[in-house]
Image (cartoon, grey):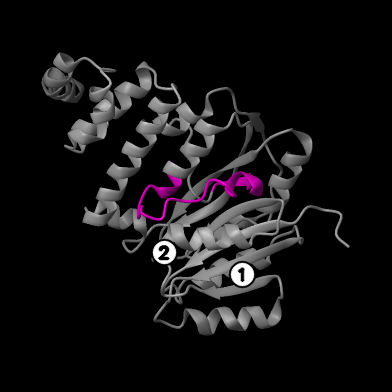
């Protein structure tokens, strides 16, 4: 019987036969052994299932689920399946084209033991092409930092970038706060912001690179920066949802108003800040003069 807490890894996949071996190998290489990995396949049409099933034959900690076609497509719905099936005390999300350090789970569990916290955040490093295995050399945790108050504000503003796969959470937090299945981009930003707005959570930062994300054009982020219409619309909707919740919970402040104000102009989407205008939480005159101030700032900055 294990005395150490069980960790649930939720690994979502879709048409990643060419990458998922490396991801699964890095999961199996974890120093910490008491984990389960729930793999949710969004009906891949390549050889992903063939590859995954071979791994399952060798390790019963892996569970493979092919999503029923009646369930919403996309990452949020897949992750929600994993959350609902999770048996671990703590939960972490991995993507199917990335690589994790062998000490990732071990370091997070040690942090949970030392502090009364709800989540552990660690650093990630991007890579392109072949992965440099030297990055997986043993590490000594160099520094941990207890994160301060109003973490939700730092996450929203981007000064504390909680990427989807760089946080281990207490699983219980997600039982009433699933991912929004209507979102196809920025769904983790919306979900994590919502968790932090609704709960007074404490967290810790491990100042080591424990997660390595692969950059390529077929990733969700790559599609967003290629101006994919669905990704952009989801990004806008995520911002509107977070703003509405901030107003509802009376947690909007000047810095957050400025952030959403700027987003509305950069994205050319006025309706992002409709909740602020409707409740007279920003000055309408300032709103209409903002483009002049914004473009003057850009010109001055270039000089």
Total number of numbered discs in the rendering: 2
Using residue 172 as the reference point, say whether residue 1 is left or right of it. Answer: right
- Spot occupied by residue 219 in the image (x, y as percentages of width and height): 36, 60
Residue 174 counted in the magenta span: yes
- Nearer to us of marks 2 and 1 is 1
The circle on residue 25 is 1
Give x and y (percent) for residue 186: 38, 47
Image-based side of 291 in relation to 153, left or right: left
For disc 2, the marked residue is 129
| Residue 223 occupies quadrant | bottom left
- From the viewer's side, name the closer residue of 169 and 299: 169
Quadrant assignment for the N terminus? bottom right
| Image quadrant containing the C terminus | top left
Q: From the viewer's side, name the closer residue of 288 and 161.
A: 288
Residue placed most toward the observer, 106 or 200: 200
The secondary element bearing badge 1 is classed as helix
* Residue 264 image position (x, y, % from top left): 22, 32
Circle 2 crowding by C-alpha within 10 Å: few under 14, some 14–19, many from 20: few
Residue at image coords 64%, 65%: 37
The residues colored magenta run 166-189
Vertical placement of residue 177 versus 83, above or below: above
Query: In what element is the residue under mark 2?
Result: loop
| Residue 156 visible from this viewpoint | yes
Lower sequence index among marks 2 and 1:
1
Residue at position x 28%, y 21% in the image: 279
Residue placed most toward the observer, 251 or 93: 251
Tag 2–tag 1 contact (CB < 8 Å): no
Q: Give the quadrant of residue 36.
A: bottom right
Residue 98 visible to the viewer: no
């Amino acid at each position: 019987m294990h005395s150490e807490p069980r960790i649930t890894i939720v690994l979502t996949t879709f048409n990643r036969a060419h990458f998922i071996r490396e991801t699964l190998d890095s999961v199996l290489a974890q120093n910490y052994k008491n984990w389960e990995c729930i793999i949710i396949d969004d009906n891949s049409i390549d050889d992903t299932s063939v590859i995954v099933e071979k791994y399952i034959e060798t390790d019963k900690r892996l569970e493979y689920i092919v999503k029923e076609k009646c369930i919403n497509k996309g990452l949020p719905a897949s992750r929600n399946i994993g959350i609902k099936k999770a048996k671990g005390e703590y939960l972490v999300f991995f993507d199917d084209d990335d690589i994790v350090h062998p000490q990732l789970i071990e370091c997070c569990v040690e942090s949970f033991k030392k502090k009364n916290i709800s989540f552990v955040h660690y650093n990630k490093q991007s890579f392109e092409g072949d992965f440099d295995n030297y990055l997986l050399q043993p590490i000594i945790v160099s520094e941990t930092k207890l994160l301060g108050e109003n973490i939700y504000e730092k996450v929203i503003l981007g000064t504390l970038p909680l990427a989807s796969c760089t946080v281990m959470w207490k699983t219980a937090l997600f039982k009433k706060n699933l991912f929004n299945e209507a979102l196809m981009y920025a769904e983790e930003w919306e979900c994590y912001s919502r968790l932090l707005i609704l709960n007074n959570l404490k967290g810790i930062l491990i100042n080591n690179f424990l997660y390595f994300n692969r950059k390529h054009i077929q990733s969700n982020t790559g599609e967003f920066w290629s101006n994919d219409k669905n990704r952009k619309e989801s990004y806008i909707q995520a911002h509107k949802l977070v703003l509405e919740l901030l107003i509802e919970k009376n947690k909007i402040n000047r810095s957050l108003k400025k952030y959403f104000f700027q987003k509305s102009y950069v994205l050319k989407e006025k309706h992002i800040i409709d909740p602020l205008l409707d409740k007279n939480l920003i000055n309408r005159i300032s709103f209409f003069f903002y483009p002049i101030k914004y473009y003057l700032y850009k010109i001055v900055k270039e000089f």
